[in-house]
Amino acid sequence: MSSDADVDAFSFGTFENLVRASLYYYHRNLEKAENDEVVQRRGQLINWIRKFHEDCGTLNSNVEESIENLRQSPCLFLMTAHQPNLFAYGGVLRKATLNQVLAEQLSKKLKLPVVSFFGLADQDFTDDRWVKSALLPDVERRDGILEIRAEMPDKLLLNKAAKPSRQVFDRWRHSICDWLDRNLNLANKSFNPSGHSGTHTKLEKNNLTQNLDGLWNVVEEAYSRAKVYADFNAYVISRIVNNAWGYGTLFSRFSECQQIFGPEFYKLLTRFEEYSRYLKEATTSSKDSQGGVYESEWQTLPFWYHCDCGSKARFMAEQKRTGLTGHGACLRCGKEYQIDFSHPENDISKILAKISARSLSMPLVFFEGLGVSCYIGGSGGKQYLQQAEYVARRMGILFPPVAIWCPKDIYSGIGQLAALSILESLAGIRDFSKYETVKTQLESKVMAVKKEIEGLEQQKQKLVKEIETSKKEKINRIKALSAEQDQIRREHNYRVLSRNLKLVENIGTVMKLHPCIVDYAVNIGLKETSEQWISYLTRDGNLLSNVCLNTRFENNIPKNEVHIDLR
């Protein structure tokens, strides 16, 4: 869809290519990206940025310096955005790292201030799984996962949902501590077995507990400051990025800063016929792809309308003789709304506090309004960003390079080592590259036994339907078949065999899981996670390959003991 673009906005193999593309885009669009309106909009944004960091407690010297840089002209503006997820997984926080390193490289090359902005989509719905769920690898639990979860009503805006009760909050901490103890003990059974005479060193709990305590201090402070659920999650992210990592990343709530984009929303409304036509083309050409926008997005106004109940309505567009009208019902309470934008009292500037951008219109509004020179996206949003790019190109709206860095971080944490401990106990190996062979062999054993049992079960069912066989004989023969089934189960230890297969399946889940930041903090350390990501970008810089990270106890594990290959 981007064949006529100056730069392919989504295909960057390396960090260096991204740097070059951002430089090219900046030089090519300097006048458009830093005009008077952009400078004015950035000045307005500063007020909301400062408010967020004061509320969060992250208005430190690095943030203050970035705010001052944002006042300068020229100044490159880099952006990323995400929902404020519960204990966000590595991919969310990695966006901030890529933005930080990119900002530093561009500043060095251009000798200009460069700021990194992180927009918090706090007006998204509570329905999304990841805003209320965080996962940790836990091989002995159901499905191989420990889920930390917040219960919230459906179809409610995140910034309208209450933060979790203290009881729930404390229960999360207890679950995580229990997870640490169980998985550490299981890992040590394999890597420091009782009576082992080798050179293994026991994986100590103290360092891991200190790591968890360091993270939980961040979480506790965020909890004490937050008044709503969205802020709790957002404060955790900002306090990691700004305080623990020392980045000058500027954060702002979308619910607040979107109010500065009246002119950009107005442009989309006045050119809605164009917007709709190009959006229809974009969605039609990508209808077989996953992750794009709502199928009738082209008939929808480019913003949500917020309802008094704490939810929002999708406005369908209608072109009347007098002008453009939007109408729709709240997705939660069903209240009907209709706005005729030809009436002066419905000027877009008067309802900015009641609207928020939709997924496709967000980049169109922010990129042009703030003169963005690069956007760091995520794999889940790639499709709608490509659709947005198509619309932007045809409407003459600025659309910068979009980079996506979503590798699998490879490291031997306690959850992963516990899984390999189970693999050793079941198959006598700790080499995960042989995992599929072990799984296939065990599946074959279970299926063979299951087939025998089911064959006898079919005989029982057939016997029940036989008319010529007497009731007494049926009962005796069914009992005999059941006894034969029990005998097969005992001979093959079918219950244990089935449990072992489930454990092996869980091993695969654990080793391939993209865990939440708790797993990184415990096993690697908060600060060390950032340092290793930065080192990877500056040393290797391949944005498409997996990233190998070192845990705090990496030296305790002989390298020939563990082999993890997830290619």
Image (cartoon, rainbow, N blue to C red):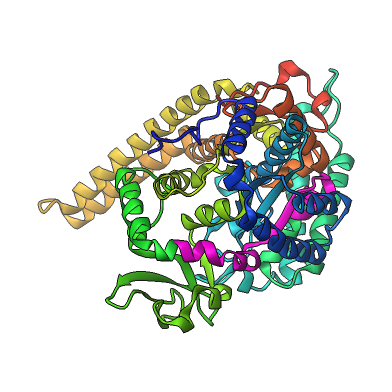
Instruction: Give the mark count.
Output: 0
Closest to the observer, 68 or 509: 68
Q: Is residue 418 visible?
A: yes
Q: Is residue 200 left or right of residue 131?
A: right
- Quick check: is 68 in the magenta stretch? no
Query: Residue 302, relative to residue 407: is it above or below?
Result: below
Give the magenta-colored segment's residue range.
238-267
Q: Is residue 215 visible?
A: no
Identify the image quadrant of residue 129: bottom right
Q: Is residue 448 left or right of residue 459?
A: right
Residue found at x 39% / y 78%: 342
Residue found at x 49% / y 77%: 347
Closest to the observer, 229 or 445: 229
Q: Main secondary structure of the magenta part?
A: helix
Could you say where residue 349 lies in the image, as x and y percent from the top left? 54, 74
Give the position of the C terminus as an image quadrant.
top right
Residue found at x 60% / y 23%: 565
Seen from this angle, which residue lies furthest top?
Answer: 560
Give the position of the N terminus as an image quadrant.
top left
- Quick check: is 251 in the magenta stretch? yes
Query: Residue 228, relative to residue 138: is it above or below?
Result: below
Could you say where residue 390 lies in the image, as x and y percent from the top left? 40, 45
